[in-house]
Image (spheres, rainbow, N blue to C red):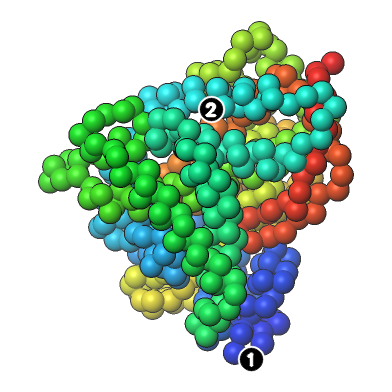
Amino acid sequence: MTVRVAPGRWPLLGHTLALVRRPAPFTAGLREHGDVVKVLLGPLHTYFLTNPEIIHRVLVTNGSSFGSGIMFRKFRPYAGNGLALSDGPFHRRQRKLMLPAFDQRHLRRYAEGWVRATTALAESWQPGEVRQIDADMQALAMTNVGEALFGSELGEEAIREARRSIPLIIQLGMYRVLSPGFAEKLPFNRRFDQAIVRMKAVVRDLMASRDADTDCGDLLSTLLLARDAETGERMTREQVHDEVMTLLTAGTETTALMLAWACHELGRNPAMAERVQAELDQVLGGRPVSFDDLPALVYTRQVVSEVLRKYALWILMRRAEQEIDLGPVALRPGDEVMFSPLAMHTDPRYWDHPDVFDPDRWATARVRSLPPGVFIPFGNGIRQCVGHLFARAEVAIGLATIFARWRLEPAGPVRVRYTTIAYPRGMPMTVRPRD
């Protein structure tokens, strides 16, 4: 079967300009050209997947036949060989060593810190004040991850550096991935390199005084003390450093954006906010939320799921490690495949009114019967984000703490820019006491 080439390619650049200029519309439109469409990143030929069944085969059914893909491999010289970037037996070993840090016992402990940090933020707001909610949520997510990792908030200097560098790493990193090799000396690539150097220095400083044999009850201690069940070996300091870099990068910006978009949607849909608050009143009765309350916060968790659907990651990539037949295309070792969680999450073939924010869709039979591969906010299979439960719980607890006290009203338009995910260009909201 012949695989069509996506329209709009340029000499030398391929589809890079289309991916950068119109990322979400371009990838969403590829479904019109087949289940598999050829997309060129400069001279690199990739296969873009628009069929959820094929995506599920890549992620789950044949997941062991695929590596992390060029998107992540290009990060490796800068961010190290953390879980999101590693492959093969090393990746499987690291995943086993890290999973205990995200079990319910640890999540329950992290949640106590999230409640304290979110309460402190909510108590600092004043009635009638206009807040840049995206900035507030970024600061909150940094505090939450820092406390989970290191047992207390990151030092002020480290927080300032992380707030400056992590958004650059995530946003400019996508341009780095999509750029042909000859573009690596462009100014945005130099800014990316400088941000990586600064964040590595922050992580090294934070780890320098930590005793590897002391359990401080935080995520870093869990990583330092973890032992391979077969060999009894621990991670090296370098490996722990790389995992901390990965967690700081992956666990702050995306969660901050989830919180911000949830506040935005509840702010412009007061009836939804009132349903969240009624649920909080019924379940909590005025006391602070805890991790054990989350199963009872059904509608609040539906809001989180709807944010994950509507504001999903734009693109992910995998690399074939062996020959594999996907139906429309037979892959050879080294072939790159791409797919868009965002495009899947807004595909009208599977979602009613996909552009509408509707938490109630998560209580319907149609959503419960979605085919595998349609809803993949954290990926799936052996490379599913190890912190997916961490992120969901953190966002739900953040919303429960904020909306138990406040109403939020949009105070101006919010423009959206896509890199790896939807970024608001400012999100002003007015803080109002609950009625």
Q: Position of residue 121 (x, y in %)?
A: 65, 28
**Which amino acid type is marked by label 2?**
Trp
Q: Hey, which residue is sitting farthest bottom in the picture?
A: 11
Q: Which quadrant of the figure has residue 281?
A: top right
Rate crowding at label 1 as few (under 14), some (14 to 19) or many (20 or more) other CA atoms within 10 Å: few
What secondary structure is found at the residue carrying circle 2? helix
Q: Hey, which residue is sitting farthest top in the picture?
A: 285
Q: Is residue 109 left or right of residue 265?
A: left
Q: Which quadrant of the figure has residue 200?
A: bottom left
Q: Residue at x 69, y 75 (%)?
A: 18
The answer to whether 257 is drawn above or below residue 201 in the figure is above
Is residue 366 visible in the rendered image? The answer is no
Q: Position of residue 151 (x, y in %)?
A: 40, 30
| Residue assigned mark 1 | 11
Q: Is residue 205 left or right of residue 47?
A: left
The answer to whether 237 is drawn above or below residue 85 in the figure is above
Is residue 404 visible in the rendered image? The answer is yes
Which mark, residue 114? 2
Q: Residue at x 75, y 41 (%)?
A: 132
Quadrant occupied by the C terminus: top right
Quadrant occupied by the N terminus: bottom right
**Which amino acid type is marked by label 1?**
Pro
**How many marks can you see?**
2
Which mark, residue 368? none
